[in-house]
Image (cartoon, helix red, strand yellow):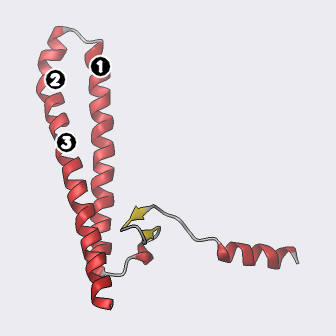
Amino acid sequence: LQKVYNTERNANVKKIDFTFIVNDKNVYHTLDDFKTKDGKQLFTELQSAEKILINTETELENFRKEWAKANEAYKTKNRASILALENRVKDLKIKISEIENRVREAELKNKKKGK
């Protein structure tokens, strides 16, 4: 009986890989939740951009830690690198926001067609 209970209980548990809010009524948790090919493709692009952002923010944080305890020669040498990383982070955040909106548009456009 325990095996049957566990099997039924696990069947009712929805797999959650991520949380993406499409609108007030729709929240996606797996790639299979996407209704459109464009939405799924854009979401994959979004995930890649988010990974790049995390890596860039980590690199920037490491530079800042070194900067705090560095001498003037290091600061002069790496000033441009830090500024470039700061701009890259800003640009990635804008890009991520734009991709999120495009994913939502693709998915919501599909819902309007379905009505």
Please give the name of the residue rendered at 29% of the width and 74% of the height, measured from the top-left corner.
39
Q: Position of residue 33 (x, y in %)?
A: 43, 76
Residue that carries the numbered disc 2 in the rendered image: 78
Q: Earlier in the sequence, mark 1 or mark 2?
A: 1
Q: Quadrant of the N terminus?
A: bottom right
Marks 1 and 3 sit apart, C-alpha to C-alpha, by 21 Å
- The one of 115 and 39 positioned closer to us in this rendering: 115
Residue type at numbered disc 2: Asn
Please name the residue shown 81% across and 76% down the image.
5
The residue located at (32%, 28%) in the rendering is: 62
Q: Earlier in the sequence, mark 1 or mark 3?
A: 1
Specify few, some or many for label 1: CA neighbours under 10 Å numbering under 14, 14-19, or 20 or more.
some
Q: Which residue is labeled 1 in the image?
A: 66
- Of pointers 2 and 3, the one earlier in the residue sequence: 2
- The answer to whether marks 1 and 2 mark residues whose Cβ atoms lie closer than 8 Å is yes
**Vertically, is 28 above or below 86?**
below
Q: Which residue is mark 3?
A: 90
- Which of the labelled discs sits on residue 56, or is there none? none
Q: Residue at x 27, y 55 (%)?
A: 49
| Vertical arrangement, residue 10 with respect to residue 61, above or below | below
Q: Is residue 23 left or right of residue 30?
A: left
* Label 1, label 2: how far apart the Cα atoms are: 10 Å
Q: Is residue 14 left or right of residue 58?
A: right
In the rendered structure, the answer to whether residue 62 lies left or right of residue 31 reads left
Tell me whether circle 1 and circle 3 mark residues in contact (CB < 8 Å).
no
Picture mark count = 3
The amino acid sitting under disc 3 is: Lys
Mark 3 Cα-neighbour bin, 10 Å: few <14, some 14–19, many ≥20: few
Q: Position of residue 74 (x, y in %)?
A: 18, 15
Q: Quadrant of the C terminus?
A: bottom left
